[in-house]
Amino acid sequence: MRARVGVATGPGTSALHAIVISGEEAASLVTALLSKPAPSGSCYANILSSEGETIDDCICLRWPVAGEVSAEEMFLLSTHGSPLIQQQVLERCTELGANEWRGPIQLFTNGSTSDSQAVAEAVSSRVRLEALDRLPHAASAEICEFLLVQASGFGFAGEIGRWRDHSPEISRVERLLELSSLGLRLVEPPRVVLTGVTNAGKSTLFNALIGEDRSIVTAVEGTTRDLVTAHAQFSGWPCTLVDGAGIRSTSDEVEVEGLRRLQQELDRADLILELLSPGQSSLQEGRRDRTLTVFSRCDEWGGDTRAQATLDGICVSGLTGEGVADLENAIIQELHGGREIPLDEPCPFLSSHVIFLQEILQALRSGNDIEQCLNRFMEGAVDCHR
Ligand SMILES: Nc1nc2c(ncn2[C@@H]2O[C@H](COP(=O)(O)OP(=O)(O)OP(=O)(O)O)[C@@H](O)[C@H]2O)c(=O)[nH]1
Ligand SMILES: [Mg+2]
């Protein structure tokens, strides 16, 4: 068999497809298809038509990578997912000599020789599928790359696969647990909630941060009542941004309900952006540790006010865009301590991984074998509510 091509996952929220190319001639086909030679690990490249025009850009991942067991060599191309683009890529592959994939796409085989090895591979396989399963819902190219890495031998799936031969060191499991907060925040984006008095400029800033005219803006106080949510991403880090009712005392039934819902959001927010005017006191005293002070409508101030406010918080104008980039950096700093998305090392990305690793750590510290933890993970017996 020369090369064959098939669709591993359909379009998701971010309209991404994963296309698999495998077979003896897969590497030469990928080299002809992409603007770069077939990678030994992963690469970012353009998919080219027969005329050398770009059909789409993609992340291309090769496996098996060193030490992995696999049915055959494969390339996974994560492309953008309009059906037209997918069709064009498949047609180009056929043009280059690939056959259409028939039957289920199996990403690797079980090459283990004992039960304990089999269960490590089964866990690795499950983690790989968990990563690929989330691929169509990736909100940014960085998250897509992160998931592809975690599914590969370089990522968390690969690391667990290597536990088939030897248990991990305690310090290694501790390191994975340390990284997990970053992975979790890529897959379960943190909630960032805007608050402030009516007309503070929340909806204007919300629209500026998502780059879209989503929330209604008027000069009328109390314009926003219901919660408005949107996906945003800052330097690849995803978050769910929430706009809501402005704080004021009111007897309007709809606004009172809007304020009640906003309070619920503020209680569970990972980060609160509190819009204040210079000299105004915070209403988030009990939530100080997760509140960022934002002085809004800064285009309206004189020089002295600006100088003072700059010392106390971030000055922003949703109207002119001034300070919005600084605010985005401050959000990343608050949520992730300014850390980069981990793209070149294994990183757990689900809360079930954290519980699994905590159990592994406990077993290692007590001098026990990890096989039972691996089995529990596979049985889904991990108790998420402990
Ligand atoms: N000059 C200036 N005007 C702004 C700015 N942000 C908002 N505005 C104006 O202020 C008014 C209220 O803006 P919104 O964004 O709706 O304020 P809000 O905080 O969402 O108000 P509510 O939904 O009523 O709580 C509108 O007329 C906006 O054009 C700003 O940065 N500079
Ligand atoms: Mg509003």
Image (cartoon, helix red, strand yellow):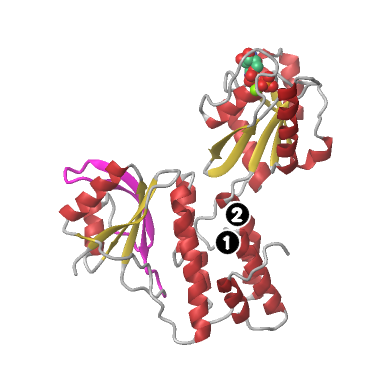
Residue located beneath label 2 in the image: 184
- The tag earlier along the polypeptide, 1 or 2, is 2
Q: How many marks?
A: 2
Quadrant where the N terminus lies?
bottom left
> In the drawing, what numbered circle is on residue 348?
1
SS category of the residue bearing label 2? helix
Q: Answer whether residue 302 is visible to the viewer in this image.
A: yes
Say if disc 1 is inside 8 Å of ligand 2: no
> In the drawing, what numbered circle is on residue 114?
none
The magenta stretch spans residue 337? no
Label 1, residues with CA under 10 Å away: few <14, some 14-19, many ≥20 = many
Left or right relative to 145: residue 104 = left
**Residue 344 at x, y = what percent?**
50, 59
**Residue 351 at x, y = what percent?**
62, 59
C-alpha span from label 1 to label 2: 7 Å
Question: Which amino acid does the dot numbered 2 rest on?
Answer: Leu
**Residue 22 at x, y = what percent?**
28, 64
User: Which residue lies at the image location 20% right of the left edge and 50% below the top edge?
Assistant: 92
Question: Which amino acid does the dot numbered 1 rest on?
Answer: Pro
User: CB atoms at circles 1 and 2 under 8 Å apart?
Assistant: yes
Label 2, residues with CA under 10 Å away: few <14, some 14-19, many ≥20 = some
Q: Nearer the viewer, residue 97 or 217?
A: 217
User: Which residue lies at the image location 48% right of the left edge and 48% below the top edge?
Assistant: 138
Instruction: Report the span colored magenta.
Output: 38-67
**Residue 320 at x, y = what percent?**
57, 18
Q: Nearer the viewer, residue 142 or 200?
A: 200
Quadrant where the C terminus lies?
bottom right
